[in-house]
Image (cartoon, helix red, strand yellow):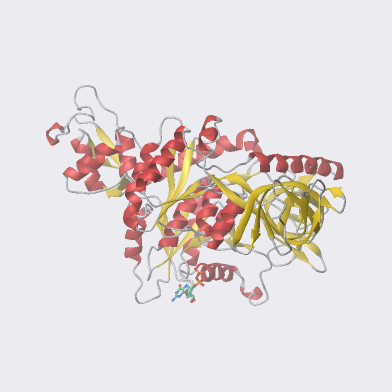
Amino acid sequence: MAKASKSQNTAPSAAEKPTKEAVQDNTPVIDLPRSITVRQLADNLKIDSIGIIKQLMRNGIMANINQVIDYETASSVVASFGFKAHLTPIKDQLLASAVEEGKRRKQKYGKDSANLVTRPPVVTVMGHVDHGKTKLLDAIRKTNVVDSEAGGITQHIGAYQVTIDGQKITFLDTPGHEAFTAMRAHGANITDITILVVAADDGVMPQTKEAINHARAAGVPIVVAINKIDKDNADPNRVKQQLTEAGLVIEEWGGNIVAVEVSAKEKKGIKQLLESVLLVAEMEELKANPNLPAAGVVIEAEMDKTMGPLATVLIQSGTLKEEDTVVVGTTWGRVRAMFNDNGKRIKKAEPSMPVEILGLDEVPEVGDTLTAATDERHAQAILTRRRAEKEKESLKNQAVNLDNLYDQINTGKVKELNVILKTDVQGSLEPIRTSLERLGGEEVKVRIIHSAAGNVTESDVMLAAASNGLIIGFNVSATEGAKHLANTTGVDISFYKIIYTLIDEVEKALKGMLEPKYVEVIEGRADVRAVFSAGKGAKAAGVMVAEGKVTRNAQVRVRRGKETLVESTVISLKRFKDDAKEVQAGYECGVGVKDFNDFKVGDVLEFYKVEKSRR
Ligand code: GDP
């Protein structure tokens, strides 16, 4: 899209008060699409978005910076700034974005480009619950089955390939953005294209918006399937309107998003949908070199009672062959047999093909990468390196939180603070979002990657984990599942009840001025079973560790009923006569507590440590 070019004397500077009179025939022209967000318009005009928002207000339109405005509204705004609008033809828009994309891909593939061949796109299906994701995946699978095979085929693994007009498409069979983002959180960005299913009778719903944000955060292009058009109350136009409001402007309306009307139930529109996917795939120029040793990602893994570890792997480049030695995550093996999506034994698998492999030493994790090795020694070398890297990563790869934000900015690890914002009511979103975005400076930008009303969910945590972001909740709480996931992934969730405090803390965190907060983490509990002398008048408690563990030097609280007798530290920890560093639940040990001798059988010792908190 052409950017604004101003001739020296004719146009007033954007900072001057705009007047309509400035528009004359020699006015500079600016190309605009049929619809555009306020932010994009500001970028094109090279002025601050606030200027656009103010001008819209003068025209009686209240809009925020992400709002989509139509061509007519945008033309009157640009006129106020001394430009004449010109409607960009759709073809040019598509071409421009395809050229940009192509450039990006070529850079990515580098010198290997001579050996690259086109590979099938890998597609996931996302959308709101009950909008027909499963049914659509089913319809697509069945569309592809040739008559002679019908009924005879049962899908074997969590992905399948279909052939349309002689070209293949790979579908990942776990619908929903949770699965999609879980893979990303593992660092496995395997989706090339997302089909966003929106039911024509229900329209754009919260999870539809979530899915859009998840796909955007991953930079994955979207093809929209407007489903259930067979229903009497289907209203595809309303869906298109809502999609535009959500920032997805479809081709028909001047945008570059392809939307296809389908009925998964009656299997209508499926072929067009698949053709659209292929079209987008073509623009994406998806390529891989099949002549290399294979590389891929685990999409499913399990332990089979008779066959041992089984893993379904999506091949991303190279060709995997039977008998290849492979390293998968931190395990390895020799491919004893491979099966395709129909359970048929195959000898080789090429890029974008999902295959089930047999012969690994252990069950790998979903998201682990597969690398083919030249021989066993090479495999062992890769394994050693990977295990060391994994250990280093787990130490180094600390998730960003308000306490370490400043350090992460300074070490260059964070340039953009990705925030997921959850509030109790819709009305609080905008003011908080605007204030947060304004906090960003030269070094770091605050980017709200997802915002919605409602409690913090697992899906929010996964998105944060995948985008190295943090979650801010205003007057909301987190679901149990979300809390658990935040703990295991290290994602920071901060809750606030006062907008001022929220903004203030984020601002301080950005500037490195935030005072740390400390919380207590319970490490274990033990029941006193006996009391014995520890010399020099001191007493020790003979305990059974009931939960967690006891460590030497831990902080400890002695409880009798509801009363806390003392808060102190462990000074001695013994298993039989020997000193111990730690004792796990289920074992007995002797514990001495600093400055405390008054143990009684039945007392409870609670061991804890104090940590910097996630606020
Ligand atoms: P998911 O939660 O998105 O996976 O949705 P499902 O695929 O389970 O579909 C939810 C419900 O909508 C089921 O009862 C389907 O039979 C129904 N459904 C799905 N697609 C269509 C469609 O094209 N037309 C009609 N009438 N119903 C559909």
The reply to whether residue 591 is in sight is yes
Left of 207 or right of it: where is 604? Answer: right
Q: Extreme left residue here? A: 21
Q: Which residue is at a point 81% across and 40% down the rendered structure image?
A: 381
Query: 376 or 265: nearer the eye?
Result: 376
The reply to whether residue 93 is in sight is no
Q: Which residue is at a point 31% across and 55% down the rendered structure image?
A: 427
Residue 306 vertical position relative to residue 495 in the rendered view, above or below: below
Residue 382 picture quarter: top right
Query: 276 or 485: nearer the eye?
Result: 485
Query: 579 or 598: nearer the eye?
Result: 598
Left of 22 or right of it: where is 544? Answer: right
Q: How many marks?
A: 0
Residue 75 vertical position relative to residue 110 in the rendered view, above or below: below
Q: Which residue is at a point 65% across and 38% down the rendered structure image?
A: 396
Q: Extreme front residue here? A: 537
Q: Extreme right residue here? A: 577
Where residue 73 appears, as percent x and y from the top left, is 22, 47
Residue 269 vertical position relative to residue 209 in the rendered view, above or below: below
Q: Which residue is at a point 34% across and 55% down the rendered structure image?
A: 244
